[in-house]
Image (spheres, grey):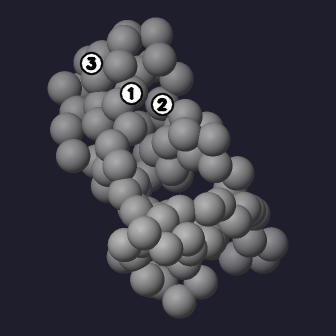
Amino acid sequence: MRTVQIKPEKCYVNGKQAIATRFNVVSIADDLFSEAQFKYTLLDENNQWCGEAVYKLSGLELYQTWDATAEGAYRIVAEGVGFEIVPMVGKSFFSEA
């Protein structure tokens, strides 16, 4: 699974607070014209699941802001849900989890 480091965010697992430091994005639907849906999964520093949801990129104008790359999907989802991606200096955009 490929992940991206994010600025720490609170999340809840089984009623307990955790801190998400990474997230993963998977495309679950794309009509190739005006709508795409991405499932994003939050992970803590030990790569343990700590939440997931679906982000919907809907409408031609918004859809056209996406460059149809994996990196672009991560950036669009992060911006859409309010995560801040932490750049990894001298490394690839993605990490293997």
Check if mark 2's residue and mark 3's residue have beta carbons within 8 Å. Answer: no
Residue drawn 72% across and 62% down? 7
Instruction: Please give the count of numbered marks on the rendered protein.
Output: 3
Q: CA distance from mark 1 to mark 3?
A: 11 Å
Q: Earlier in the sequence, mark 1 or mark 3?
A: 3
x, y percent for residue 92: 63, 72
Q: Which mark is residue 22?
A: none
Residue 30 visible here: yes
Q: Quadrant of residue 91?
A: bottom right
Tell me the amino acid under the disc marked 3.
Answer: Phe
Secondary element at image label 2:
loop
Q: Nearer the viewer, residue 5 or 20?
A: 20
From the viewer's side, name the closer residue of 87 and 21: 21
Callout 1 secondary element? strand
- Above or below, comparing residue 16 to residue 87 in the picture: below
Q: Which residue is mark 2?
A: 66
Q: Amino acid at mark 1?
A: Leu
Q: Tell me which corner region of the image, top left, top right, bottom left or bottom right, holds residue 87.
A: bottom right
Contact flag, marks 1 and 2 (Cβ < 8 Å): yes
Q: Nearer the viewer, mark 1 or mark 3?
A: 1
Q: Which comes before the other along the chain, label 1 or label 2?
A: 1
Residue wearing tag 1: 57
Q: Residue furthest bottom?
A: 46
Around disc 3, counting alpha carbons within 10 Å, would you say few (fewer than 14), some (14 to 19), or many (20 or more)? Answer: few
Q: Name the residue carrying label 3.
A: 33
Q: Is residue 83 above or below residue 64?
A: below
Q: Residues within 10 Å of mark 1 (few under 14, many from 20)?
A: many
Determine the residue positioned at 37% across, 72% down: 14
Amino acid type indicated by mark 2: Trp
* Residue 5, image x, y percentages: 63, 68
Give percent across and percent down for residue 18: 56, 74
